[in-house]
Image (cartoon, grey):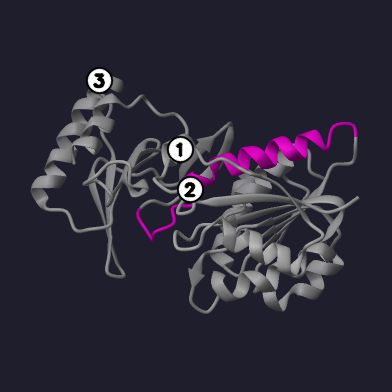
Amino acid sequence: MHALLHAIATMDLPHDARRIFHGRGGLHPGCEHWALDAYPPVWVLTAFEPASDDTLAMVHTALAQRWEQLAPGQPLNWVYQCRHEGRTETRQMAGSVPDPHVVTEDGARYRAHVLRGQNHGLFLDMAEGRRWVHAHVAARSAGRRGLKVLNLFAYTCAFSVVALQAGARQVVNVDMSHGAMAIGQQNHQLNGITTGASFLAHDIFSTWGKITRGGPYGLVIVDPPSYQKGSFVATKDYARLLRRLPDLLEPGGHALLCLNAPELGTAFLQEQMQALAPELAFVERVANPAVFADVSQDRSLKVLVYRAPE
């Protein structure tokens, strides 16, 4: 675990939520099961294999020593989560977690919940995707009415927050989780956004009529889970989304397609797009944050941009 301890010993004081160490990318042999994230003022260490008490004590010592250098006299707050064989165990190892816990990214504020579940309210690997959305919407909203955006599988609506901050006219957020939608509404309130967003807590596949009637959209964001039993399985359900994209987009509109399944490469999306929506042209793949570097680009998060004809 030398690479993890080295990352801790050399890390800067984080102000925004971000990943500090990404062993899952395979670039640090022997540390593939470790990830360390900052959700200030809390550190979250995730292990994908059980860790011994001695190992966790080593991590605690490293965090405490570096924290004393970065923030002398401030309490160390850190949480350990083990995900192994379908089970998740979360432990608060030191200090406390604010309640409510609010983190920032590029000036935007989001609710975080690091003590429950595997998803903590903000997917850190999607930071560049959010920056792309902000820049894209801002470039197309200056001096105009602003884009209308459809945010599918919206989770806690971070894409909606940045789109509205960038000047979007309206964002339609759709996610079947009522709890996620409620946090999404809180995220808008945290950022002083009181108009422009709608929240549909529905199964997307049973809400197509309402979604289609609300269009067309200048930007459609598709960020589904790769595998969620009873909700979405990428290998069979992504096609159901892609064939509807051309009817949802206004002329010249863009689609941002996201896929976080290590076993499915870029070709999975590109081949399906060519078969199901060939009129949409590939524009670019959005780079992931540098800290999420992977031995294989195809294993890492895929964020692809497509454009409808004028």
Q: CA distance from mark 2 to mark 3?
A: 35 Å
Q: Nearer the viewer, residue 161 or 209?
A: 209
On screen, 31 above or below 154? above
Between circles 2 and 1, the one closer to the viewer is 2
| Amino acid type, residue under disc 1 in the picture | Ala
| Amino acid type, residue under disc 3 in the picture | Gln
* Number of numbered discs on residues: 3
Residue carrying label 2: 297
On screen, 13 above or below 77? above
Disc 1 element? loop
Q: Residue at x 87, y 55 (%)?
A: 250
> Going from the N terminus, do you reach mark 2 or mark 3 first?
3
Q: Is residue 7 magenta?
A: no
Left or right for 162, reference 57: right
| Amino acid type, residue under disc 2 in the picture | Gln
| Residue 232 visible in the snapshot | no
| The N terminus lies in quadrant | top left
**Quadrant in the picture for residue 21:** top left
Between circles 2 and 3, the one closer to the viewer is 2
Q: Residue at x 45, y 38 (%)?
A: 17
Disc 2 element? loop
**Quadrant in the picture for residue 51:** bottom left
Residue carrying label 3: 69
Q: Residue at x 18, y 36 (%)?
A: 2
Q: Residues within 10 Å of mark 2 (few under 14, many from 20)?
A: some
Residue carrying label 1: 17
Q: Which residues are magenta?
A: 115-143
Q: Is residue 141 magenta?
A: yes
